[in-house]
Amino acid sequence: MRLYDTATRRLQELPPPPGPIRMYFCGPTVYQRIHIGNARPFVISMWLKRWLERTGYEVTLAENITDINDKIYAAAPGDSARLAAEATQWYLDDTGGLGLGRPDVEPKATDAIPEIVGMIEQLVSAGHAYPAEGDVYYRVASFPDYGRLSGRHGDEEATRNPSEEAEEAARKEDPRDFALWKGHKEGEDTWWESPWGRGRPGWHIECSAMAEAHLGAVFEIHGGGLDLVFPHHENEVAQSRSLGHGFAQLWMHNGMLRLSGEKMSKSLGNIVSLREALDEWGRETLLVYFLGAHWRKPVDYSDEVLEQAAAQAESFRNVFRSEPGEGGDWGELVAALDDDFNTPEALAAMHGWRDPELLRRGLEVFGLESLAEVAQAPAELEELARARVEARNRKDFETSDRLRDEIGAAGWVVRDVEAEPGFQLVPKQ
Ligand SMILES: [Zn+2]
């Protein structure tokens, strides 16, 4: 199986099964309901895990929850811990609504403080970081490979960081340096003791420490949104590799989600939460929508695109409503997914499948086996349909037509099929 790697800018072959494949995906910073765009890395990571497991790999997926961050302090001054706990539950509920299961581990930054502090201590004693008035900064000049992942080197970006305070800039040896530990400030309701005094970790060190704590110093795949390549992932690489840790062997960055469509921007504003999207479209339509775009490409989110996804979901349901057919080749799915996890191609292949068992198995990879569960008719209608088959068998077409009309009046269509019991009941559209 091959996946595109941001670091080498080419497709890389995964080790053969059973691997192991250890994956770390950057999860949300919890201070509000997650945006539909933030659901994309979650969906991709869960699908990849499910596919790799079905093809014989041993997979461990860790997806963190950043529950200490400037954004959380800003969203709930003096009350950030309560907001972070509440928003963590929203995240678990909303992603749970996608019906894809959960990552193997979902570490929280607040549970990883000893590992974070330990890693910062190692960086300081190796000369890769320095304390400065209660803060600790990473010394970018000490890591010659800085900028290799993103192709950016941080010179202008670091100085332009709008969230950075003037005092913080004054404490740095170099504008590219970034905070590993931030001294406690008045009004912040959470802090931890450390060798540099009371404070809390920076964002980037949280992910280096949590990834290594759960997956080890070397692991196969690191994922996240394309917007995280710089500075977040560049800084993770610097922190871990300067300690001699191999860290991620392949970097998977998903394309961003673009909001468009007049109706949506009018009714919902420019931010659509996963919760709103689930309420409006349902999980099956949302999953078909994500399937239709290659994970590396940007994807538009609009009523029009979602309506198309809903129609595609319906056409899959129709396969299960019709007389069981034949046709389909599992090899098509393998070829599409093993070549850079090409879900649009997998989706197109499955649209051609008429063998219901094969199709159900394919949909199941993506958590869509529910499309095979077409509505069950009431028992009394099943009785009428059975009586109609018997009438037809004895060529009593008058009775058979009358029973068909009775079933129709109850809102159902009866179809003749060859397989037992000889009929199929489908709700009228
Ligand atoms: Zn991260």
Image (cartoon, rainbow, N blue to C red):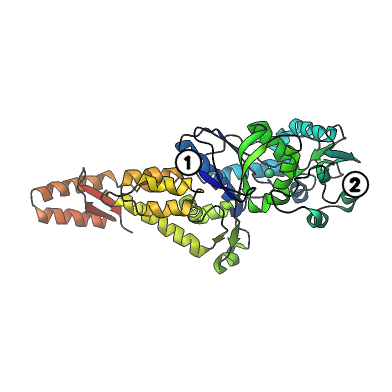
Ligand 1 has an atom within 8 Å of the beta carbon of the residue at disc 2? no
Q: Residue 427's x, y, as percent?
A: 31, 54
| Total numbered labels | 2
Q: Is residue 68 visible?
A: no
Dot 1, how many residues are within 10 Å of its Cα: few (below 14), some (14-19), or many (20+)? many
Q: Secondary structure at mark 1?
A: helix
- Residue type at mark 1: give it: Trp
Looking at the rendered structure, which numbered label has been put on residue 51? 1
Q: Secondary structure at mark 2?
A: helix
Identify the residue at image location x=76%, y=30%: 114
Numbered label attached to residue 171: 2
Indicate which quadrant contains ligand 1.
top right
Q: Quadrant of residue 131?
A: top right
Q: Earlier in the sequence, mark 2 or mark 1?
A: 1
- Foreground: 328 or 272? 328
Q: Nearer the viewer, residue 90 or 399?
A: 90
Q: Which x, y percent locates residue 66?
A: 69, 42
Q: Report how far apart the C-alphas of labels 2 and 1 lie in the structure.
A: 48 Å
Q: Amino acid at mark 2?
A: Arg
Residue 289 visible in the picture = yes
From the viewer's side, name the closer residue of 391 and 216: 216
Crowd tier of the residue under label 2, counting other residues whose Cα lies within 10 Å: few below 14, some 14–19, many 20 or above:
some
User: Can you name the residue that lies furthest to the bottom here?
Assistant: 262
Provide residue 126's location: percent of width, then percent of height: 83, 34
